[in-house]
Amino acid sequence: MPGRYGPWASLPTRFRRWALDGIFEGMLRAAQAQAAVAGDISWLVSVDSTIVRAHQHAAGARKEGAHDPGLGRSRGGLTSKIHL
């Protein structure tokens, strides 16, 4: 890492702090606004989703009281739904 970013061990902490403070959302909004003004972005949106099967070992060992909201059990086994 370049020295201007500080010690490499502090990067995960900084990344999490910026994410919680909304820095990345602000950067995205600014980039979108700039692209919209320049006419470089189209706001036509298409939404799609699919079901993805997870391997039987993907859930790992269950701890008592633990719940993984990313995986759900259905008739097809462990699955997760992905939206785009």
Image (tube, helix red, strand yellow):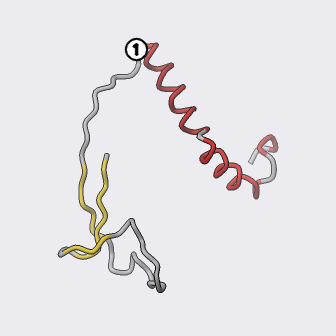
In-image side of 81 versus 12 (left or right): left
* Residue located 28% across and 27% down the image: 44
Residue at x-position 39% and y-position 67%: 69
Mark 1 residue element: loop
Q: Which residue is mark 1?
A: 39
State the image coordinates of residue 62 (x, y, percent, origin top left): 44, 84
Residue at the extreme left = 75
- Residue 81 lies, in percent from the top left, at 29, 59
Q: Position of residue 21 (x, y in %)?
A: 63, 43
The extreme front residue here reads 65
Split into 4 quadrants, where in the image is the C terminus?
top left
Residue type at mark 1: give it. Gly
Task: Tell me: 77 left or right of 6.
Answer: left
State the image coordinates of residue 79 (x, y, percent, origin top left): 28, 68
Residue 17 sits above or below residue 74 on the image: above
Tell me what residue is drawn at x 40 percent, y 14 percent: 39
Rendered view: 36 above or below 3: above
Residue 50 sits in quarter: bottom left
Instruction: Please tell me which residue is depicted at 47% across the width and 25% down the height of the picture.
Output: 32
Assess disc 1: are there few (<14), some (14-19) or many (≥20) residues with their C-alpha within 10 Å of its C-alpha: few
In the rendered image, which quarter is residue 77 located in? bottom left
Q: Is residue 76 above or below residue 62?
A: above
